[in-house]
Structures are given as structure tokens and as C-alpha cells.
Image: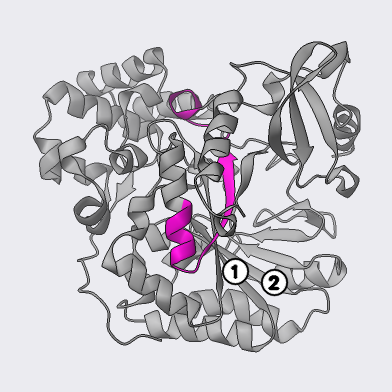
């Protein structure tokens, strides 16, 4: 571990009530501030001084990608919804009336896509385990209750319902004993993904209470522990100068010393997130524990919809010893219309970026949709029967037999998600749709 780290910023979380204390926001016209506040009533907003001072180029705002990544924008809501909230704010409507309107808008934004509640929540002894998801045979997701927030919120986050008070739609578990017992009963599971939110907002002692039981149980099937995090981008001091940073790294060392594979699933949206001295120092310390850093993010309009940005991002990751892992397609939830990139353009961006880097950086798979049936990648565009088609392939599937299977869809330059595609050659449906319906009926 390195002893020398860059000076630490003051950790000062800023939420909706503090929005206008940010000088650059306070300087905006009153109408613009009202619009930002209205959007932040519907979608979660949280940022900190590190993001404000080290990552955002305020001279380029509002077009700066990190500003778009972290600050609410008027276009993120439908015009009618935005005006509804603005009118209520202007009139000084009672809090209950405002909350009711906000909840109605939120529930219309497809808050849990891809069957996260209806299909992914496992059961044990006849009881739903709402702090877990089990979509793919080998991998279980675990949501520790204390990790269901983040150092800052991405405006496009598909798990935004975790942060806005929709308790009936929230995933959270208070203890890991159920997880261990579930894994004992499902020895086919090899990977546990501790996710959120961001588990690395937790103090190390709390995170240890999640991870240690997995190590002590010595489950024969479990070989990998993954931790999903954006902390490297939003608060790299978690790994360097936080009071329990050394304890955290010792915990990671214990995982790898037990012969377990530890993977940090690093959410990395833009190369700027890897450029600060604090981020570079954090990555070096993390690698010293034996953890592997695998980097992933969605392709987002206004943030990283440029092949040069992705090529630079992948090169930075390889240079620092991290592994480019996934380029995702923005999910069909929340402010999807504001951020979405059509599949045809996503494929062009991915292919162009891949051509700009060496083989070491071509490990990122994409553009991949984490859709209801599974992870589906757009492999290319080809001609079949005199017409153009998308060639698609399952990287993961609810049915393991689907993994690796290819299929064709009619080419549509406007389609941005799997359910917007039609089967090739006039077929009535894709091969997976009937068995998927049967799975849904069984639930």
C-alpha cells in the first residue's frame, strides 16, 4: 500500500436543500434554478465538493459531461410533468400535494425495469428475499441496507428508485445470514455481487459484517465476491485518507488471501474521472490488495456519446491497471429519453472506439442491453434475405441455454432497446419470448 496520498477534499454532501448554496447554481437565472429544483424533486440529487471542485469544468456548463452526469436538467422530465411540479412549487402547494404529484410522475418512469421485482427477487421457505436478486444462475446480487445511497448520484442511474423514498420498490437487506443460507441451498452460485446504491459508502466495520460471513461459511461453490462502486470517481479518498481507508484495504486483502477472487465493479462514465491525483492514488492502493478492477458504464447522450471519449477512457483504464469490461445501453427507465442513444449509433460508437485502441483495451463488451431476458449485445449489422438486420447475441440469460445464442432483428435506426426491435424475416416473435412469458406466469 502507498503511504503518500494527495491532499483530501472536504467531504460535504450537497442535496436538494443545499442546491442553491453552490455559487455556480446560485448565479443562474431564477427560472433555471426553479427548473433544476423541480427535476430534483422527482429524480435523486446528491453531489459533493470533490465532484464540484475536481471533476466539473464549470466554464463548459451546462454542456460539461460531468455536470450533465450529476446535475438535474429540465429535459430529463416530460414537459407536462415538469410544468406540473413547477406550478406546485410556485403556488406554495402543501407538501402532501407536491409529494403526491411527484410520486405519480416517479411511478410512470418505469422505476424497476427488466423484471427486477417481478422476476429477480428470490424466495426461501416461501418468503421473498427483498434484499437480494437472482437473475442469472451463477450470480446473486446482495443489497446491504447501509449501502443504499451513493457519494453522488448519476442522473441516468437505473436504480434511482433506491434513493427517492419509494420504500415498496426498494431493495435492502439488514443482515447477511439469509444470504449465506440461500447460497448453501444454491451451490451452483459462484459469484456474489454486493451492490446498491454503493456499498463503499458504508464504514468498513459494516461492510465487514456483510463480507466476513461469506468467508467464514467456506461455501464450496462461491469463488468470487464483487463490489459495485462509483467511489473511485466520486470519492477516491475512501481508499486513501478516510479514517478507515486502511481497514478497508485490509479487508480486501483478507478476501484475496482466502483464495477468493475480489472484483471491484467500477462505474466509470468519463476519462476525467481517472485523471485526478486522488483517483490515481486510490487505484494504486486498490491494486496492491489483489483486487481486480473491472470498469463499466452505459453509453449516454451528452456524457460520453463519442468514440474518442470511450477510446480515451479504455486507454486510461488499461494504463492504470484496470480492465475495460462493459459498454451498456442506457436502460429504459427514469430520464431515458434525455440520455438514450439508438442502437445503430451505439454500435457505430463502440466499433469506432474499438478501432482506436490496442487489444488490451478491447476487453469491453458492448453495446449490451441488460434487458428482461438477459444481457444482449449488438454484434453488428448484416444483410440477410436482401434486407438489413441487427445481429444480436446473449451474453447472459435467464435460461443458461440462451447464453451465446445469436439471433437477428430487423434493422431500425431509431430503436434504442430490445423491446423496440422486431424479429427478422417476419417471424411472429423472438425465440426467447414464449419461454419468458412462461417464466413470468410461473411467478
Q: Residue at x 60, y 51 (%)?
A: 364
Quadrant of the image for the C terminus?
top right
Q: Residue at x 46, y 60 (%)?
A: 317
Residue 32 x, y percent position in the rendering: 19, 25
Q: Which residues are magenta?
A: 314-340
Q: Residue at x 60, y 27 (%)?
A: 343
Toward the viewer: 251 or 346?
346
Mark 2 sits on what residue?
A: 224
Q: Are marks 2 and 1 in contact (CB under 8 Å)?
A: yes
Rendered image coloring scheme: one colour
Badge 2 marks a residue whose secondary structure is strand
Using the rendered image of the protein, determine whether residue 166 is visible from the camera's viewpoint: no
Specify whether residue 75 is painted magenta: no
Quadrant of the image for the N terminus?
bottom left
Residue 198 x, y percent position in the rendering: 48, 59
**N-term-proximal mark, 2 vs 1:** 2
Mark 1 sits on what residue?
A: 263
Q: Residue at x 83, y 46 (%)?
A: 403
Badge 1 marks a residue whose secondary structure is strand
Using the rendered image of the protein, determine whether residue 376 is visible from the camera's viewpoint: yes
Amino acid at each position: 500500500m502507498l503511504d503518500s496520498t494527495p491532499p483530501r477534499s472536504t467531504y460535504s454532501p450537497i442535496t436538494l436543500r443545499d442546491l442553491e448554496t453552490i455559487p455556480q447554481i446560485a448565479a443562474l437565472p431564477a427560472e433555471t434554478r426553479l427548473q433544476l429544483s423541480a427535476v430534483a424533486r422527482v429524480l435523486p440529487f446528491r453531489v459533493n465538493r470533490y465532484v464540484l471542485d475536481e471533476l466539473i469544468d464549470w466554464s463548459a456548463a451546462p454542456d460539461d459531461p460531468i455536470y450533465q452526469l450529476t446535475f438535474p436538467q429540465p429535459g430529463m422530465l416530460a414537459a407536462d410533468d415538469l410544468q406540473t411540479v413547477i406550478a406546485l412549487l410556485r403556488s406554495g402547494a402543501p407538501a402532501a400535494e407536491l409529494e403526491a404529484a411527484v410520486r405519480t410522475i416517479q411511478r410512470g418512469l418505469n422505476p424497476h425495469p427488466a423484471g427486477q421485482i417481478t422476476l429477480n427477487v428470490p424466495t426461501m421457505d416461501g418468503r421473498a428475499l427483498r434484499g437480494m436478486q437472482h437473475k442469472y444462475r451463477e450470480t446473486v446480487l446482495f443489497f446491504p441496507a447501509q449501502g443504499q445511497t451513493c457519494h453522488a448520484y448519476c442522473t441516468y442511474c437505473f436504480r434511482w428508485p433506491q434513493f427517492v423514498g419509494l420504500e415498496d420498490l426498494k431493495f435492502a437487506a439488514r443482515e447477511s445470514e439469509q444470504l449465506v443460507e440461500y447460497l448453501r441451498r444454491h451451490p451452483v452460485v459462484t459469484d456474489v455481487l454486493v451492490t446498491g446504491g454503493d456499498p463503499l459508502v458504508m464504514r468498513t466495520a459494516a461492510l465487514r459484517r456483510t463480507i466476513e460471513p461469506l468467508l467464514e461459511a467456506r461455501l464450496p461453490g462461491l469463488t468470487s465476491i464483487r463490489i459495485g462502486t462509483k467511489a473511485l470517481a466520486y470519492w477516491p479518498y475512501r481508499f486513501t485518507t478516510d479514517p478507515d481507508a486502511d481497514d478497508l484495504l485490509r479487508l480486501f486483502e483478507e478476501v484475496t488471501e482466502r483464495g477468493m477472487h475480489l472484483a471491484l465493479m467500477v462505474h466509470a462514465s468519463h476519462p476525467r474521472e481517472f485523471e485526478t491525483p486522488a483517483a490515481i492514488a486510490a487505484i494504486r492502493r486498490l491494486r496492491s490488495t489483489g483486487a481486480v478492477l473491472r470498469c463499466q458504464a452505459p453509453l449516454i447522450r451528452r456524457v460520453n456519446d463519442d468514440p474518442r471519449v470511450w477510446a480515451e477512457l479504455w486507454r486510461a483504464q488499461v494504463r492504470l491497471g484496470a480492465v475495460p469490461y462493459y459498454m451498456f445501453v442506457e436502460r429504459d427507465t427514469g430520464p431515458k429519453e434525455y440520455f438514450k442513444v439508438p442502437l445503430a449509433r451505439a454500435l457505430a460508437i463502440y466499433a469506432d472506439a474499438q478501432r482506436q485502441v490496442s487489444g488490451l483495451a478491447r476487453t469491453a463488451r458492448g453495446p449490451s442491453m441488460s434487458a428482461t431476458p438477459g444481457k444482449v449485445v449488438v454484434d453488428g449489422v448484416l444483410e440477410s434475405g436482401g434486407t438489413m438486420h441487427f445481429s444480436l447475441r446473449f451474453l447472459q440469460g435467464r435460461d443458461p441455454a440462451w447464453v451465446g445464442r445469436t439471433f437477428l432483428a430487423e434493422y431500425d435506426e431509431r430503436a434504442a432497446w430490445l423491446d423496440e426491435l422486431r424479429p427478422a424475416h417476419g417471424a411472429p416473435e423472438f425465440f426467447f419470448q414464449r419461454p419468458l412469458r412462461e417464466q413470468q406466469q410461473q411467478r
